[in-house]
Structure formats: structure tokens, C-alpha cells
Image (tube, helix red, strand yellow):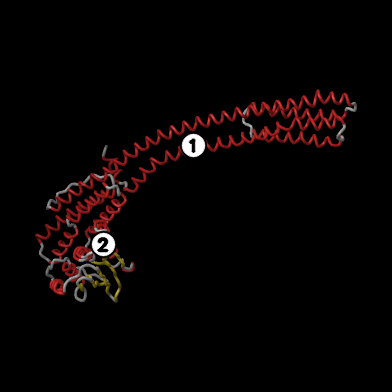
Amino acid sequence: MRGVPQKRKKQMGLEKRMNRLLFSTMIPMACLLVILLLIFWQYAGQYNKLSENLAVSSKFNLSFKDELDLEMYYLAIGSKEASELDDVVGQVEDAQEIMEKLRKNTYHASGVKCLNSLDAYLDNLKKRMLQLMEIKEYDKRMEFMDSNIRIITGLIMQEMQNYIYNESMYLVKVETNLTHRVKILISGMAVLLLATLGILMRRSFRLTGGIIQPVTEMRDKVKKVGKGNFDVLPVSAEIIEIEELDQGINKMAHRISGLLENVRQEKEMQHLTELQLIQAQVNPHFLYNTLDTIVWLIEGGMTDDAVEMISSLSIFFRTSLSKGNDIIPLSEEKRHTLSYLEIQQFRYRDILEFELSIPKELDGIQVPKLSIQPLAENALYHGIKNRRGKGKITITGREEADAIILTVSDNGQGMTPERLHEVQEAIRTGERAGFGLAAVAERIALYYGPGYGMTISSKEGEGTTVELRLGKNIQPKS
């Protein structure tokens, strides 16, 4: 029952796992923040409308009674013509419009009740104003003014004061509710933040342990392989890149073991050369030095660099295996060489630069596996590392009639004329001269025959150039 979830975890890549870790911790915080902003937005809208109501009602209450009483007094005593009554009635209608505007922004029942009363008073006021102008006698008009007009305007003023009081109380309530909810949300955010940090730390430690432990086990496994122990067991890992890397190591170990057994039984030069090249590719020192570098990057917190290096090493092993094929497209050989140089650049970033420029039009041409990478390795170890300062390896390719020309050059230490002659003779005769060049030259001769092969030129202190001439149609030898 426990094997099923482990299998699912192994199908998840490092990048996807880190994205899940990030989203699972950030989404709850983002949701809570959105809720907080929505509450602020809601209460801010209510607060603005209440503030506007208070401003309008206060301004109305300051001037309405005094101005209207004065205008009606002038009409009552005859200082103004009756025709001017329409202007005074217009003031009341303006007040009714103000009441309607306040009604749109009033949310509580007590405020609405006050506005209803104010509407009734204003309607009654208009009627009384018209009745006043119908009275002809001065004394009765002044008595009607005092007992009706001024009493109604007083009631309007008193009711407006009640409305202002109710709005003020409701504003205080809104502020109190807002403060209370904000405190609750901030407390919730603090609790959620602490919980999220705890989960994040727990998952981070688990993720780091899920990388360091299997990488350390693979490093120990490679050391065993380097000592000749090819009976290795798979490493349990939850990250697909590490799982692929371990599978590549296991396949390489079994392949080395099988090739070593074949060498004991077969003496043909082709098999011997293939074995030497493959053994060179799985140099245990190269592997566990690379794994040591990955462990150092992870412990140093440089997980992005570690992921890139693991990916390059995974590609390196996949192209080394090539599903058991010895003839591969040039694009795979390019990828294999590029992954090797990327891995080495992490280790020698202070001294190594490289450029790989082979036209894509040549990608589909079939070539012997491990044709370019050994040359890049020689350029690094026998050229770049022996010079002062930073060096550069340049790999180019071009098409020439029925052949392709692949060139690997460096601006490293170069060779003396004597050493250059020794290496050229080794390439010509097939003898080993300390470089891996002769093995590559022999494979080209086996597959392509006369007219194809390797040439080398070098100048001490300036660098070395190795050129491969390969046919477009390969002829494998049995």
C-alpha cells in the first residue's frame, strides 16, 4: 500500500514540487488579503456616504429655518410682492430634493424615519405658505405666521438635528465594526502567517533532505563503481531529476560491467576502443566530483544552480546511453558535449568559457557517439587548465561537399613542436600518447574508411585545434 504514493511522488519534478510549495503557502495569504481589502472597500464606501450625508444635512440645518422665516416674514408684512412666493416655494422644493438625495445614502431605519417626517413637514410647509398668502388682514397673517410657518420650520430644524444625531451614531457604529473586523482579520493573518511559515519550513527541510540524501547516496555509489563494485542498488528519491540521474548511473554501471566482460572475450579493436571511450565518459572522479559540487550548491542555498547542474548531468547520462546505440544524430552528440561543458563550467567558472556553434541543418546527420566530447575534454584538461587566466573552447561545424567538418579549438597552453609531432604520430599509427585523441581517430577510420579522419595543429602558448572530417553517410563495421 505504501508503494503507490511513493511512485506518485517520484513522478514530480523538482521545479513542479517547488512551485507547489510556493503556491500552497502563498494562496491562503493572498485570499485573506483580498478579503481584508474588500471589507475596507465596503466600509470606506459607507463611511464616505455617511460623511457626505452629515455635511449636507449640517449645511441645510444652519440656514434653512432662518432664511425661510425671514422670506415669509417679508411676504407677510408686504415688503415683498405675492408673486415672489414662487421663489420661496422653490426653496422648499430644493429642500425636498436634498431629502431625496439623503435618502439614497441612508441605510438605517431611524434615519429613514427622520427623512419621511421631514418630507411630510416640507409638504405641510408649502400648503401653509399658500394659505398665508390668502389671508388679507395683517394681524391674522402675522398670527398665522407665528402659529404655523415658524412652528413647522422649527419642527423641520429639530427633525434634521435628530437625523444628524442618528447618522453620527451610525457612523460611530461603522467605525467600531470596521475596527473590530480589522483586528480579527489581522489576528487571523498573524496566525495564518505563523502556520504558513511553519509549514514552509517543514516542507523546505523535507525537500532539501529529499535532494541531499539521495545525491549523497549516489556519490557513494559512484565511488563503489570507481573501485570496481558494479553490484549497485537503486536509490529511493522523490524528485524525478534525481531518479533519472540514478537510473543513468545504474545503467552506466551495468553497461560498464557488461563491456568489461565483453573485452575479456573479444579482442577486436573496435570493441576495445568503444570500451576505453565509455570508461573515459564515466570516470568516477568526474562523477563524484560533480555530485560533490551539487551537494555543495544545495548546502549553500543555490538550489537553482543545483537544479541546472542535475539537469545537465541527467542529459549527459541519457546521451551517453543513447538506448545502447553507437551511432546517433549529430544533435545528440552536440547535446552531450554541451551538458559536459555546462557541468565543467560550474567547477571551472573562473577559467572556462565555451562556444558551440554547429548549424542546425547538420543535426540529422548520423555520427559515431563520443566524437566531439572527448576532444572538448582534452581541450579543457590539457589546454585551458594549463594556462593562466580564463580560456575558451570553441566548437564549430560546417558542410563541405559530401563531408562535414567538426572543429574543436582552444586558446590554452598549446604544445611544443616535439609533443605535437608525438601526438600526430599516435593518431596516424593508433598508438596511445596520453591523450584520448587516438581512440576517436580509430573509430572514425573504422566507420568511414580512407579519406576521413582527424588532423591536429597546435602552437605553444597560443592553443590547439583538432579537426574531424566525417562522411554524411556512415558505414558501420560489424
**Residue at 76 percent of width and 35 percent of height:** 93
- Image: 284 above or below 23: below
Which residue in the structure is indicated by mark 1?
36
State the residue position of label 2.
352
Q: Tell me if residue 155 comes above or below residue 457 in the rendering.
A: above
Residue 227 — which label? Answer: none
Tell me which residue sits at (81%, 29%) in the image.
127
The answer to whether residue 238 is above or below residue 183 is below
Residue 105: image location, x then y, percent: 64, 34
Residue 256 position by quadrant: bottom left
Q: Amino acid at mark 2?
A: Leu
Report whether residue 464 is seen: no
- Secondary structure beneath label 1: helix
In the image, is 185 to the left or to the right of 165? left
The percent position of residue 372, horizontal first and vertical second, equals: 24, 66
Q: Nearer the viewer, residue 385 or 60?
A: 60
Report helix, strand or loop for mark 2.
Answer: strand
Amino acid marked by disc 1: Leu
Q: CA distance from mark 1 to mark 2?
A: 53 Å
Image coordinates of residue 420 in percent, x first then y, are: 16, 73
